[in-house]
Amino acid sequence: MSDDLAGPVQRSVPSPRLLSGNVHGGRTRVRGRVALLLLGGVSMLLGLSAGLMLLGLPAPITAERLLEVHGQLMIVGFLGTLIALERAIALRRAWAYAAPLATGVGALLLVTPVPMAVGLAVQAVGLGILVTIYAAVWRRAASTALAIQWLGSFLALAAGLLWLAQVPTGALFPLLAGFLVLTIAGERLELAHVASPRPGAARALMLISAAVAITSAAALLWPTPGSELFGASLLATVLWLLRFDVATRTIRSVGLPRYTAVNLLLGMAWLAVAAFTWLTLGPQPDGPGYDIVVHAIGLGFAMSMVLAHAPIILPAVLIRPLPYRPVLYLATFALQASLLLRVAGDVRGSGWAWQSGGAGNVAALMAFVAMAAALVIRR
Ligand code: HEM
């Protein structure tokens, strides 16, 4: 591993020794973490099934409720659970695990016959605990990178409460996008700091992040100017990442650092697609433009980041290495190609391309899960 990545990884993810059961909590705690990871995985599988149903394609699970809760399953049930689990592990306090537990269990409740408000409320509680985790970490070690991620968690909590108040996803999606973007940008700032501390860089990202948070709320209240300004803030985030993120340098290395950088840069490109769409076309609460912004952020940006960070984060959760192998690029290219096809389908009004691209998205994510599981088990 290059020095560029070796340092940050040690900082942002507690070392396997620190995380091992011997040091705090024993095997039970490790099993608990794996169970929470699986809870997020089940949410993703349910969300993918819902995605196939929304495309009008055959799906393995076809509960009627799935059609209404695809966004909650994917963003809070899957990504929210992963983020909260990573933060709980870093905080090393038993109560913090209640955050991924609630976001994951809330997601499962959403597909049961209990009233939808119950699942949404449990998820909102989980997001509230995530905000509290950041507060506890802040007391231990305040930093700009943490402040940015903390701000992101407030946006997620706001979205969770607005879902409870029955505000449609199309209207509040900028808050969810802000949550994902600020969480990831804050984590990248930690890495950029170690690789090349530049005066003013952290302050600039803090200002941009404040703009992302304010304009995501403005997009909800005043859709046209708010969405355009939100797009501009996201574009500023992309420019900051291109200027300061280590990925622009590690792309020239080999092995894992290059694999990580490829996925990161592709993720930034998709963030730019969403940003340009909002900036030039204004609000996208439904229709093909909605499909583009939602999945440029949810799949192109966030899932590329998951692929990029999985070989670094998963070992910290599982206490087993996920060895890098070039075969992992297959999932990257499948995700990119299928998302391009899907967006082309949206732009040209081709139902065939949209459906095939969407089905390809599901296949790409499943291929990644299968490869990662095989690599962890074989190792
Ligand atoms: C991987 C395969 C996926 C497929 C096949 C899929 C499919 C779909 C479809 C067909 C829609 C309806 C689009 C529309 O109304 O215009 C949709 C909406 C949505 N998707 Fe996905 N999606 C996938 C992944 C994701 C991911 C990874 C995320 C987020 C992390 C996500 C978040 C959303 C959200 C928030 C909505 C809006 C839901 C609503 O308005 O209720 N999707 N998806």
Image (spheres, grey):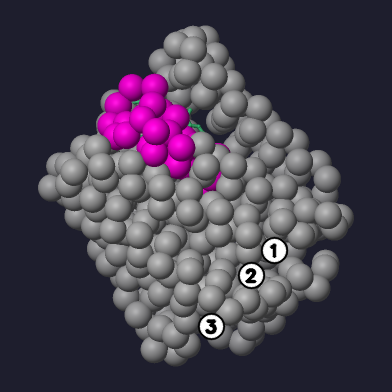
> Residues under labels 3 and 2: Cα distance?
32 Å
Residue 246: mark in rendering: 1
**Disc 1 or disc 3, which is closer to the eye?**
1
Q: Residue under label 3, please give it.
A: 25
* Amino acid bearing label 1: Val
Q: Nearer the viewer, residue 330 or 183?
A: 183
Q: Position of residue 44 (x, y in %)?
A: 47, 43
Viewer-nearest residue: 95 or 249: 249
Residue at image x 52%, y 42%?
Answer: 272
Amino acid at pointer 3: Gly
Q: Secondary structure at mark 2?
A: helix
Q: Quadrant of ligand 1?
A: top left
In the rendering, at what x and y percent does residue 285 appear?
Answer: 28, 32
Quadrant of residue 47 within the rendered picture: top left
Contact flag, marks 1 and 2 (Cβ < 8 Å) = yes
Q: Earlier in the sequence, mark 1 or mark 3?
A: 3
Residue at 85% from the left image edge and 57% from the top image edge: 253
Few, some or many C-alpha atoms within 10 Å of disc 2 (few <14, some 14-19, many ≥20)?
many
Q: Nearer the viewer, mark 3 or mark 2?
A: 2
Q: CA distance from mark 1 to mark 3?
A: 34 Å
Q: Give the amino acid at mark 2.
A: Ala
What residue span does the magenta drawing correspond to? 274-303
* Residue 263 appears in view: yes
Question: Circle 2 is placed at which residue position?
Answer: 192
Left or right of residue 246, residue 176 in this image: left
Q: Residue furthest left?
A: 165
Mark 1 neighbour class, 10 Å CA radius: few under 14, some 14 to 19, many 20 or more: many
